[in-house]
Image: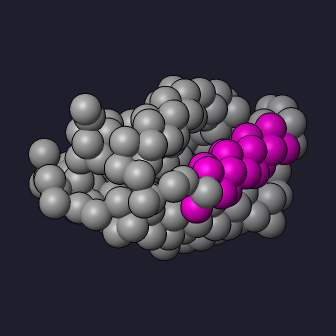
Amino acid sequence: MEGTNPVNKKLAAALSGGAVLVLALTGCSGDDSNEKLDAWAKEVCDGVQPQAKKIADANAAIQKQTSDNSKPEDVQKTDSQAFKDMSEAYKAIGATVDKAGAPDVENGEQKQQDAVKELNGISSSYASLQKQVDELETKDQARFAEGLKEIATELEKLSKSGNDALKALEEGEVGQAMNRQESCKSATASASAPATQS
C-alpha cells in the first residue's frame, strides 16, 4: 500500500513546477531604457516580489511535510495552508498587473488583460485544491493517500498549463524593462531557490 509520504513527495514535485510560473514574470536583459515602461515594470515587480516569496514559502512548507512520519492530519493542514497562500499570492499578482495598467507596448492592453485573467484563473485553481485537501478523510491513511494522489495530478496539470498569457505579456520590451528591476531579479531568485528536501 502506498503511504502518504510518496504521494506527498509527488505533490511537492508537482508544486515545484508552479515556481516556473513566477519565473515567467522576469524577462531577459536589454538596455534600451524606456521610462514609461520602466515605471510600469517597477510597479509590477515590486508587487510581485512579496508574492513570489509567499509562493516559495508555501512550496517549502509542502516539501518539508514529505518525511516518512508525517501524519495525514499534519499533511492536510500544511497543504491546505500552502494552497490558500498560493491562491492569495496569484490573486495579488493579478491585482498588481491589473492596477499597473497596460504596458506601453503594442497590444499592451490585450496582453495585460489576458495575463490578469490567467493569474486569477490560477488563483481559483489553488483555492479549489485547498477545498479538496480540506475534504480529504485523514482517519483512513489509504484513502487519504488516494485523495492526495488526485490532488497531485491536478497540481501537475496546473503547473504545466497556464502561463502563456504571462509569457506574452513579458515578451520583448516588457521583459527587458522587468529585468532591469531589482525586485524582479530577487523575485526570480526566491522562486527558483532549489528545495533542500528530497
State the residue in front, 159 or 173: 159
Name the colour scheme: one colour
Residue drawn 51% across the image and 64% down it? 80
Instruction: State the count of labels.
Output: 0
Residue drawn 14% across the image and 53% down it? 68
Residue drawn 35% across the image and 60% down it? 72
Quadrant placement of the N terminus: top left
Relative to 136, 8 lies left or right: left
Query: Which quadrant would residue 69 be assigned to in this image?
Result: bottom left
Residue 118 covered by magenta stretch? yes
Q: Is residue 192 visible?
A: yes
Q: Residue furthest front?
A: 140
State the residue in front, 26 or 141: 141
Return the x and y of residue 48 as percentages of the image width and height. 55, 63
Return the x and y of residue 142 as percentages of the image width and height. 37, 42
Q: Main SS of the magenta segment?
A: helix
Relative to 188, 163 lies left or right: right
State the residue in front, 58 or 115: 58
Return the x and y of residue 163 as percentages of the image width and height. 60, 34
Residue drawn 80% across the image and 66% down it? 99
Query: Which quadrant would residue 43 be assigned to in this image?
Result: bottom right
Residue 69 covered by magenta stretch? no
133 to 43, vertically: above or below: above
Q: Is residue 54 visible?
A: no
State the residue in front, 107 or 132: 132
Question: Magenta segment range?
Answer: 113-134
Quadrant placement of the C terminus: top left
Return the x and y of residue 7 as percentages of the image width and height. 32, 39
